[in-house]
Image (cartoon, helix red, strand yellow):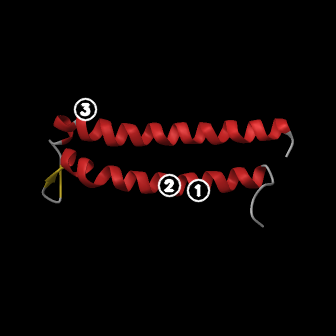
Amino acid sequence: MENKNVQEYWKRNLKYLSILLAIWFLVSYGCSILFVEQLNQIKIGGYKLGFWFAQQGSIYVFVGLIFIYVFLMNKLDKEFDVDEK
């Protein structure tokens, strides 16, 4: 890859990482700590939603974000012709 393409590739990669990590931070920190009182008004399966996010929800979101990252990176690799063929 040319130097310009390498820079664009990594710029987009870091953009994806920043967005996905921000989402994870908002879910894990925001829903488990900052907004726990508001979320505890809602119950899922008999458990308060704030407790659920603190114990399980943020993990599920993190795993989901991993799959989204893989999808985005495969698409980016194909666009820059560095995918595994």
Amino acid under label 2? Ile
Q: In the rendered image of this protein, does residue 73 appear above or below residue 5?
A: below
Q: Which residue is mark 1?
A: 70
Q: Give the side of residue 6 with respect to residue 60, left or right.
A: right
* For residue 14, side relative to residue 26 (left or right): right
* Residue at the far front in the pictured view: 3
The residue that label 2 is drawn on is 66
For residue 9, above or below residue 67: above
Q: Amino acid at mark 3?
A: Leu
**CA separation, marks 1 and 3?**
29 Å
Q: Where does the image place residue 11, in percent across and percent down from the top left?
A: 68, 36
Q: Please name the residue that numbered disc 3 is placed on.
A: 34
Q: Position of residue 70 (x, y in %)?
A: 58, 56
In the picture as drawn, the residue positioned furthest to the bottom comes out as 85
Quadrant of res 41: top left
**Label 3 vs label 2: CA separation?**
24 Å
**Mark 2, secondary structure of its residue:** helix
| Residue at image location 62% in from the left, 51% down from the top | 72
Q: Say left or right for 49 vs 82.
A: left
In the picture, the disc for residue 44 is none
The C terminus, quarter of image: bottom right
At which x and y percent is residue 6? 78, 41
Q: Residue at x 69, y 54 (%)?
A: 75
Inter-mark Cα distance, 1 to 2: 6 Å
